[in-house]
Amino acid sequence: MTSQTSPYPQVPPPPPPAATPPATRGWSGSDLVIGGALIVLLIALFLPWFSGTVRIFRTAAATGSVDGAQAHGYLWVVFVLAIVALIVLVARDAIDRLPGNLPSPEQVLVGATGLALLLNILGLAQKPSSGAAFSVGWSYGGFVAVLAALVALFAASGTAARLAQARLRHHGTGA
């Protein structure tokens, strides 16, 4: 018998698949709510929080407004917290893969949005003082900021609670 060789070269088998990175979770509806509320919060920090009128001889001479960061310098902490929360929201999958005993991204989101809410409430409650020649009232920016921080906190808390229940169910089944 004669052996025949094929005029067509054989295609080598494909290499074994490399370790594929784990699939990302993607953004759920509550993640979109948290992200949207944080963006609204960032914007609301620069909306008018307080408005004032200067009166000379019982007539309004000048009116003006001030945003939250101008009225209370500590509201810059809220700005930083909102940026950190957005970074955690975007990089959550990478943070989950970091070695060590770090807080979960959900814990960071709940902590950051909770502290942002408390600082916003404090900033809204501390209305600048009025005097005989001028009066100060609230404007809409502070209320928008508090509402956005509240929405972000509730959405982050709901996400953290659902993930904690899922982890308990997973560990409870012995898987």
Image (cartoon, rainbow, N blue to C red):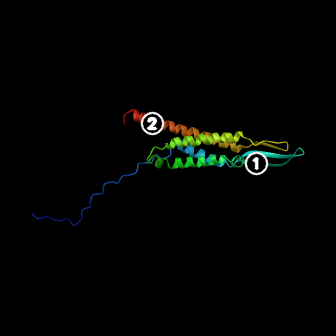
How packed is label 1: few (under 14 Cα within 10 Å), some, or many (20 or more)?
Answer: some
View extreme (bottom): residue: 7
Q: In this view, which residue lies farthest toward the right?
A: 57
Specify which label sits upstream in the sequence, 1 or 2.
Answer: 1
Q: Looking at numbered disc 1 in the image, what kind of residue is underneath it?
A: Ser
- Quadrant in the rendering for residue 16: bottom left
| x and y, in percent, of residue 173 in the image | 38, 33
Q: Are marks 1 and 2 in contact (CB under 8 Å)?
A: no
The residue identified by callout 2 is 166
Relative image position of residue 57 (x, y in whole percent):
90, 45
Is 2 situated above or below 74?
A: below
Q: Position of residue 88 (x, y in %)?
A: 53, 47
Question: Horizontally, is 151 left or right of 168 in the view?
Answer: right
Number of labels in the image equals 2
> Where is residue 125 drawn, in percent x and y?
71, 39
The residue wearing badge 1 is 65
The amino acid beneath tag 2 is Ala
Residue at the image position 83 percent from the left and 47 percent from the top = 54
Alpha carbon distance from label 1 to label 2: 48 Å
Q: Residues within 10 Å of mark 2 (few under 14, many from 20)?
A: few
Q: Residue furthest front?
A: 100
Can residue 39 be seen from the camera position used here? yes
Question: Which of these two is toward me, 117 or 144?
Answer: 117
